[in-house]
Amino acid sequence: MIGKSGLTDLFLSGVNACLPEVAMDGKIPDLSEYKKAYLLGFGKAAVEMVASARAQVTIPVEGVAITRHGYGNNQTINDIEIMHASHPVPDESCTKATLTLIEILEKATENDVVIFLVSGGGSSLLCAPAEGISLADKKSITKQLLFCGASISEINKVRPYLSRVKGGRLISRCTCPNVMSFLISDVVGDNPQAIASGPTVNNSTDINEVLSILAKHDLDVSENLIESMRANSTPEVLCSNYDIISKSSIALDTIERTLERGGWQVESWGDALEGEAQEVGRHHAELINQLALSKGKYAFISGGELTVTINNPNGAGGPNLEYLLGLLSGIDKKIHFEALACDTDGIDGSEDNAGGYVNTTTLDRSEAAGLSVGEQLQSNQSYEFFKTINDLVVTGPTGTNVNDIRIILMYVD
């Protein structure tokens, strides 16, 4: 066994391959024909993306980087304002930061260039409610979607119809014709319309599909709010020149190569997994149980973004911890294994951890501590479970965000 520290190092090798300083290297073209560059970043990797871009720009610069509270602390960027806002549920700080960004954007003229630097988390951080929709309405719908277990792709389809900036509405406010966007993808399938809810690209989601999502999850939405969403039609805008500079597959490929060099037989289950976290964990346990037949060292890796249905509003934890508890509840106790599941941005759900770690001894140790996997899942108290047995993985904010990564190692003697 390589242990929690070894698996954490392996996870971080994938994260490091997706850092903005790596992904942005050499991406900014020669801008000498322009008078000024406007660097506008939003998302969990905004500070690092803007800093990397700023280092490559030699003409005068103005801009802003909007990131989550606790990210980019103690950092400064010449000519750039760093603003912190709320995530995953937007508040007044998000609106204030967004209005600042719009004010800067609207200064750009035909002699300038606008560079958007977009990463996951931008959907919450970039918040300007549409006409007839209040911040309270946005918060209510966001909370309901998060609590009911709606997929991230479903949430990102709803958000543009509540907003003045998402779904291409931000770029429609730009009168400068010289625009480019650099994106770090945290969404399954790397659809640019879904990354931060696509403020700089066209939105192809029809309002009827959005209303079907609200009905599917039985959300409490007033008729007046629905009418306001209908009225918030998608603007006809040209897509900006965008470049997806980093994504989950890069992290997984890095991890796979490292494992293969270490003599592991690696099977990738892909970078696009979605679904209820604990159910995916149980399904992976079933696969492991079936595969534990022949002697060898096996590694199973996957990416994507799982969701949690909230039964307890006062619970603590996130999809990676619930995934591990689902895995733990289904795996054969005789199998010699260890596993890690973490969010690449360094925060899994509501607390301070990136994710967690389990191995063959976890069930015995948790039972000795009086913990029940089933009860912790039912009450959404996965954080308490892993904190009690000292198997949280804490990295702090990483500076990037390319979805979740899961690694399972199995040893068959």
Image (cartoon, rainbow, N blue to C red):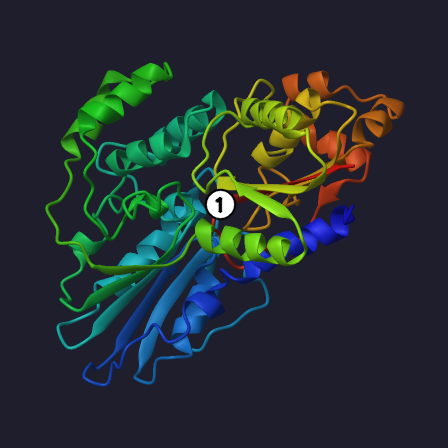
* Extreme residue toward the front, this view: 294
Is 30 rendered above or below residue 51?
below
Which of the 4 image quarters holds residue 9? bottom right
Q: Residue at x 73, y 53 (%)?
A: 6
* Extreme residue toward the right, this view: 368
Residue occupied by mark 1: 403
Q: Residue at x 31, y 22 (%)?
A: 213
Query: Is 347 in front, or is 99?
Result: 347
The image position of residue 165, as x and y in percent, is: 26, 47
The image position of residue 177, as x and y in percent, is: 13, 66
Is 326 rendered above or below residue 30?
above
Residue type at the position of mark 1: Asn
Q: Residue at x 46, y 41 (%)?
A: 270
- 49 with respect to 208 (left or right): right
- 394 with respect to 46 (left or right): right
Which of the 4 image quarters holds residue 379? top right
